[in-house]
Image (cartoon, grey):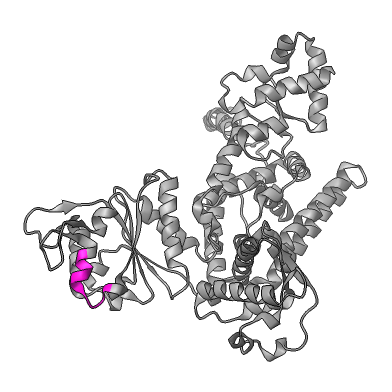
Amino acid sequence: MVKDNIQQYIAGITLEFDRCQDMSIYSAEQIAAVMKLKRNTVSGYLNQLAAEGSLVKINSRPVYFLERAALEQALGVPVYADSFSSPEEVRGLKSEACEEQDVFSSLTGSHGSLRQVINQMKIAVKYPPNGLPILIQGNTGVGKSHIAQLAWQYAVSQGILKPDAPFLTFNCAQYYNNAELLSSNLFGYIKGSFTGASSDKTGLLEDADNGILFMDEVHRLSPEGQEKLFTFLDKGVFRRMGETSGWRTSRVRFIFASNLDSSGYMLQTLFRRIPIVVKIPDLKDRVREEKLQMIYLYFIREAKNLGQPVLVSRTVLSDMLEFQYEGNIGELINIVQYVCGNALINSRDSRIRVTRACYPAYLLAQIPARMGGSEQSGEIEIAPDARVNSLVRLSDPGAALEDEFFSGLLQAYQLVKTGQTGRRQFESELDRVLDRYLDQLYFRKQNYGKEDLSYLDQILEQVFRQMEFQSGVTVASGPRFSLALHLTYRRACPWDEADGCRELYQLAQYIRDVYPDESRLGEHLSVNLQQQLEQRCTQKDKLFFTVFFRNIQVRSFVSRTRSLILCHATPQPAASPTSATAFSSFRCLRQWICPWISRRER
């Protein structure tokens, strides 16, 4: 009864943890005083509850105790670890979760083929005071308008724009042969400026004030329209049609889009006024994992529309990975909708089954002869609430490498934790699991973009150069390339931190305790990669880095300086002036070097 009362009391005060200024209320001494119990009694129950997993410990001085379920409610994030080093580390869980709430993270390929595109979009939105004009190039259907919409959401989420800031779309193709209509819509007009202008009217430049104006197919603007737009971009002023004096101003962020190389179709005066140009790749040029993620994403969307799961044969999934989508993502969405609709009207029971029979005729012609014949056995159920990453791991052996790797680590940990194996067997198993994981990455390296792999290898070269200066670690090109392969896979198949479990965090704590040097290197690598790649490293990442550094045996590189021996010798007699001078110099050197070593060790 006392134990339950203690847990209930701690749960109550833990709900206020995020706003609490006085951490002493979570100490055993303070809890005992409030509940009018002996401190030893309370301390015993607290440690018992912590061992059971009901409480989380903060190993500071004094030690603090938080109730796990209440802490998760207070922070709004799951808490897997059993202990933390400081209250700030606990609060950091919330900030890490907030970092992940980047609207661009929902975009397939945000850490892969679209990484640079998104980075440049953020630059264009954030640049003070009114952002930078940006031109998005890409063929029809690659998602230019969707990315522009996400840029507006990002600006709002970052506090750059107000929640009610306008996002307006203007399709320049509609006004290709009518410069007057273009000007009237873009700049507005005054009463009487042309036949039918019975009153003043604002244009899009005024309507989009303090917001974003997305101008699609900008290459279709007439030269006259481009000149007027250049004047506004250059000077920030404009006039409505019919105005002859005075200037109007508007604070508008421009996002332009074109499905052509606009440098050959736009006036150079306007094109040079757009400092950022990005290109979105076609769907056929995306890596396999990104294609699979998008296929599942749109099947989940249709399952939600239909209000029931959709069963998709494995053959259909294989086919859809091989199709040539001339209309890119737009065509993929249409195909998914078509096959789901066809399956719905032709289903023999209440279940919706998508097979090759559901294809439109033109898709059947794209199926290679080697894929002909009977369909592969098996199908995958896609529920309305399914998660893309889980489905990818279910259907793609390459995407399941993460599960296999961490399952192997956990099995090795359980054996050493229960005393069934010793330290040496545990280390051998770590090496085996890591080597198998890296071997499979080598076999699959052709599935990843060569540019991404080369880029990450160069980033790692810079990072390890910094770490060599900071920690004295030297990593050869072979292990560095293995790590680049891992990061390429990691970005193509994002690891889901929500799949972590308490046992995984216990394993991470054990690894940190047993391999402190390698763990510190893993932390250093995580920090440097976060700075270089603008991608948060999760608990799983840090655990992987620690195991990686242990595997390549970096301990000899990071061993602490134990002593420094300084000697001097002279063939002359001990009483000679030269010997006395040498001994004096040696003593001065010792007085200087010892404090330096002490500072370095700290």
Say which quarter of the image contains residue 260.
Answer: bottom left
Task: Please state which of residues 563 and 82 is positioned toward the viewer in this rendering.
Answer: 82
Task: Please state which of residues 190 and 37 is positioned toward the viewer in this rendering.
Answer: 190
Q: Position of residue 504 (x, y in %)?
A: 75, 46
Task: Please state which of residues 508 and 295 is positioned toward the viewer in this rendering.
Answer: 295
- Dominant SS of magenta comes to helix
Q: Residue at x 53, y 60 (%)?
A: 107
Please tell me how many numbered marks the rendered image carries. 0
148 sits to left or right of 363: left
Q: Residue at x 29, y 50 (%)?
A: 130
Q: Please say whether residue 177 is one of the residues in the magenta stretch.
A: yes
Segment colored magenta: 175-184
Q: Position of residue 419 (x, y in %)?
A: 91, 42
519 sits to left or right of 536: right
Q: Position of residue 502 (x, y in %)?
A: 76, 42
Q: Please say whether residue 469 is visible from this viewpoint.
A: no
Q: Position of residue 430 (x, y in %)?
A: 79, 54
Figure quadrant of the N terminus: top right
Q: Is residue 262 above or below residue 411?
A: below
